[in-house]
Amino acid sequence: MDPLVITVAAVGAELTREQQPGLPIAPEEVGRDAERCAAAGASIYHLHVRDGSGAPTMDIERFAAAKEEIERRTDLIIQFTSGGAASDPEEARIAPLQLRPEMATLTTGTVNFGDEIFSNPRPLVERFYLRMLELQILPEFEIFEAGMIENALQMYERHDAFHHRHFDFVLGVPGAMPAWPDAIGFLKSHLPQGATWSATGIGKSHLPVTEAAIESGGHVRTGFEDVRYITQGQLASSNSELIARVAEMSRSAGRRVASPGEARTILGLSSSKG
Ligand code: ZN
């Protein structure tokens, strides 16, 4: 098995500092958070940004500032969200890609997201995908429902693309695919040869999904966007505490944790920072 690639989804678009005092907001806080996460074993930093008041934003300046803070302090792979918050308009979601992060997420279909709709009609997905290809940004296909795998594969074929294919199974979002015990086995059985995948369980399903991903050769995403408690009823003190927990679970299962350099090799990214 490859060493475990751990992604930290550190900020997200939903959580507030009232709910989680450790949430990094200012670019410098994001940079320091990234540094601690790297030390704890993360290799990818999945980035959303907030404005000065802590509200989610797709503002390019905020992305640029956070990216710079992370790059100055770490060798982490930076992965921008292209989803933003569920209600962000298309133009706002695509704009930060011009900063050319190494990776960006791409959700390949529309899905219920709590009481909202996370809207990803095919023309939008196609446009975001072509933009990523143009700027040589590796997409991570975000899979909230099984059909999204097929959408991603068809799009790859349609454009004669040849990048490495990496998927992230997001399980347990209210209104979307639950973290059924057989979900990971089913989803991964539909991936093409050579593809890699990670999984994240939202909220209560976080640990079972993490464990299943470690044991079945996948990779793991954790962080405040996905989980805010370290044990039942006790808030995690930081993103790095959540990373350290996953790293420890992996080592006790006999699987070591990937460095950012190893993660680049696993994901087919070039070894130097872009
Ligand atoms: Zn996200």
Image (spheres, rainbow, N blue to C red):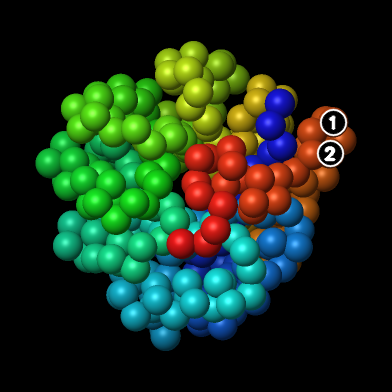
Identify the residue under disc 2.
251
Query: Residue 116, percent across and down?
Result: 28, 48
Identify the residue under disc 1.
254
Image side of residue 14 versus residue 229, left or right: left
Q: Give the quadrant of the N terminus.
A: top right
Give the vertical position of 104 relative to 215 (above or below). Answer: below
Image side of residue 122 versus residue 239, left or right: left
Can I make out residue 16 in this image? yes
Three-letter amino acid code of the residue under disc 2: Arg
Q: Mark 2 and mark 1 in contact? Answer it, CB < 8 Å.
A: yes
Structural distance between the alpha carbons of marks 2 and 1: 5 Å
Name which quarter of the figure residue 215 lies in.
top right
Image side of residue 148 versus residue 223, left or right: left
Name which quarter of the figure residue 141 lies in.
top left
Image side of residue 57 versus residue 39, left or right: left
Give the vertical position of 144 relative to 20 (above or below). Answer: above
| Secondary-structure class at tag 1 | loop
Most foreground residue, 64 or 239: 64
The crowd level at tag 2 (other Cα within 10 Å; few <14, some 14-19, many 20+) is some
